[in-house]
Amino acid sequence: MNGAVFIYEYAAYNRWANQQVVAWLKTKPADLMERETPSSFPSLKQTLTHIWDTQKWWCDVMQQAPTEAHYGRIFPGTMEELFDGLEQHSAEFAVLAASLSESALEETCTFSIPYVGEFTRPRFEMIVHCVSHSTYHRGQLVTMGRSLGFTDAPMTDYMFYLLMAKQS
C-alpha cells in the first residue's frame, strides 16, 4: 500500500468509526447527551460537535476556503441533527480525501490557527492529524459514556476496521 492509498483508507476508517460511535450513542437516553461529564468538553453532545467542527475546519483549510473556528460552540440543533451532520460530514471528508491525487496530497496549504500562528503543511498531514484528532475524542466519548453507565461501547480501532469490519 502506498502513502496515498493509506490516506484514502484512513479517511474511510474515520467515517466508519464515527458511524459506529453515532450508532452506539443513538441507543442511549437523549437526556444523557447533555449531562456534564468531566472531559475536554463538558458533555457528549459538545464533544461530538467539536469532532464535527474540527473536521469541517480542516476540510476548509485543505480546499483553501475561508475558515471560521468554532472551538467550544454549543450546537443549537437536536441530537438527531448532530448525529446526521457528523455522519454526513465524515462521508464528505472521506470523499475529499479520496479525490486528491498523490501530488495534491503532497501540496502544502497555508493556514492560521487562532492564538497560535500561521503554518504551512501538506494536505496528507492534515488528513492524518484530523483522523487522529477524531480518534482521540472518540476515546473520550467512550470514557464519558462509561462514567454515565454505558458498558457497550463499540470497537473503533483502526486495525479492527482493517481486519474485521472491512471484511463484512
Image (cartoon, grey):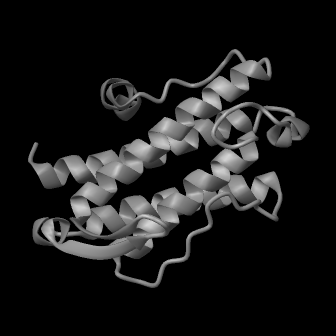
In the rendered image, the quadrant that contains the N terminus is top left
Left/right placement of residue 144 relative to residue 161 reads: right
In the rendered image, the quadrant that contains the C terminus is top left
Foreground: 38 or 61? Answer: 38
- Which residue appears at 42% of the width and 69% of the height? 59
- Which residue appears at 35% of the width and 81% of the height? 64
Residue 153 occupies quadrant: top right
Left/right placement of residue 75 relative to residue 162 reads: right
- Which residue appears at 74% of the width and 47% of the height? 45
Percent from the top left, x then y, of residue 121?
23, 65
- Say how many tags the image has: 0
Residue 13 occupies quadrant: top left
Foreground: 144 or 165? Answer: 144
- Which residue appears at 55% of the width and 36% of the height? 138
Image vertical order of residue 27 relative to residue 116, above or below: above
Percent from the top left, x then y, of residue 52?
58, 57
Image vertical order of residue 34 relative to residue 109, above or below: above
Percent from the top left, x then y, of residue 162?
31, 31
Percent from the top left, x then y, of residue 150?
74, 20
Residue 123 occupies quadrant: bottom left
Image vertical order of residue 47 relative to residue 86, above or below: above
Q: Residue furthest bottom?
A: 66
Left/right placement of residue 13 relative to residue 152 reads: left
Foreground: 79 or 53? Answer: 53
